[in-house]
Image (cartoon, rainbow, N blue to C red):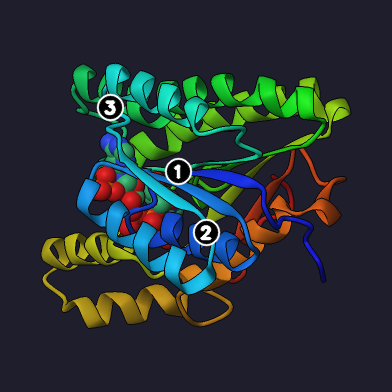
Amino acid sequence: MDLGLKGRKALVLGASKGIGLGIASALAAEGVDLLLAARSAEAVEANAQKLASEHGVGVKAKAVDLADPASVAALIGWARDEGEVAILVNNGGGPPPSGALGVPPERWTSHFQSMVASLIAVTDAMVPAMRSNGFGRVLTVASSGVVQPIPTLAVSNTLRASIVAYMKTLAGEVAADGVTVNVLLPGRINTDRLRNLDKARAEKSGESIEDIAKASQAEIPAARYGTVEEFGAVAAFLSGVPAAYVTGSIIRIDGGLIRAVGG
Ligand SMILES: NC(=O)c1ccc[n+]([C@@H]2O[C@H](COP(=O)([O-])OP(=O)(O)OC[C@H]3O[C@@H](n4cnc5c(N)ncnc54)[C@H](OP(=O)(O)O)[C@@H]3O)[C@@H](O)[C@H]2O)c1
């Protein structure tokens, strides 16, 4: 299938590794020029060089800290200077494990900044040009926890619910202008983040990481963790021209992990 993406430009946040890099790679394979950003300048620069040489696309990189509004403002200025962004991938880090009680107020605030306010700021800056061009794609990586809250990730469950509400509202505002807005829910994709969460659970329970991972995979109907390539493929399809009628949707990429029908 021709996704009609050749020569378009995407801004991918959280693109130093994991899901963000998986999406960037899938888009590069479709001929999309890329702007990559994450805190690690070295990692995004190395990814830029690799993707450019592997796929013959233009790739530039910049360091950004989504927890820092000044850094986000600089990113927005840079992305605008680089030309029109047709595809925005909102992605970044997740919070450390915690329950709902006893989280210090400042932790709620700082994660709200990095996981919600900064993503809204970047979206707000990128969408007007998409509307004028009559084509745009906004993809936001959230978590299966927005459908079925994960008991050990209260901050993630709570703040991601808010970004989902924002994106759903936005989808209705811009759909008639050719801009689609969708949220992707990873459920146990094999990345550093997942491995660190398994490690934390192992340390808490005294079991080995291997046993924790085995038990975790046994809860998934697909009986395994997903790959960033599988995640990237879904994101690339949703970025494409043929996916023009998919908007305001929450798409699970979770091997069937969430058993509920709705959401
Ligand atoms: N993997 C899963 O199964 C799963 C499940 C549910 C939800 N999620 C969520 O999906 C997102 C991506 O997951 P992942 O597994 O790919 O995580 P990951 O391996 O930890 O990668 C996170 C990415 O975000 C960047 N990042 C982190 N903090 C940042 C900040 N303050 N400013 C800018 N960039 C930042 C990281 O790069 P730098 O460190 O260089 O900044 C990295 O590129 C996360 O929010 C995660 O919580 C993942």
Residue 67 disc label: 3
Q: Is residue 175 left or right of residue 108?
A: right
Label 1 sits on residue? 91
Q: Which mark is residue 23?
A: 2
Between residue 14 and residue 99, name the one nearer to us.
14
**SS at circle 2:** helix
State yes or no: Cβ of the residue under disc 3 lies below 8 Å from any atom of ligand 1.
Answer: yes
Q: Earlier in the sequence, mark 3 or mark 1?
A: 3
Real-space Cα distance between discs 1 and 2? 10 Å
Give the alpha-carbon distance from disc 3 to disc 1, as whole Å.
13 Å
Which x, y percent locates residue 121?
Answer: 48, 20
| Mark 1 within 8 Å of ligand 1, using the beta carbon | yes
x, y percent for residue 137: 69, 40
Residue ID at (29%, 24%): 71
Asked whether disc 3 touches disc 1, contact meaning CB atoms under 8 Å apart, the reply is no
**Dot 3: within a 10 Å radius of its alpha carbon, few (fewer than 14), some, or many (20 or more) residues?**
many
Q: Residues within 10 Å of mark 1 (few under 14, many from 20)?
A: many
Is residue 102 among the parts visible in the rendering? Answer: yes
Residue 97 located left or right of residue 91: left
- The quadrant of the picture occupied by the N terminus is bottom right
Q: Is residue 247 left or right of residue 99?
A: right
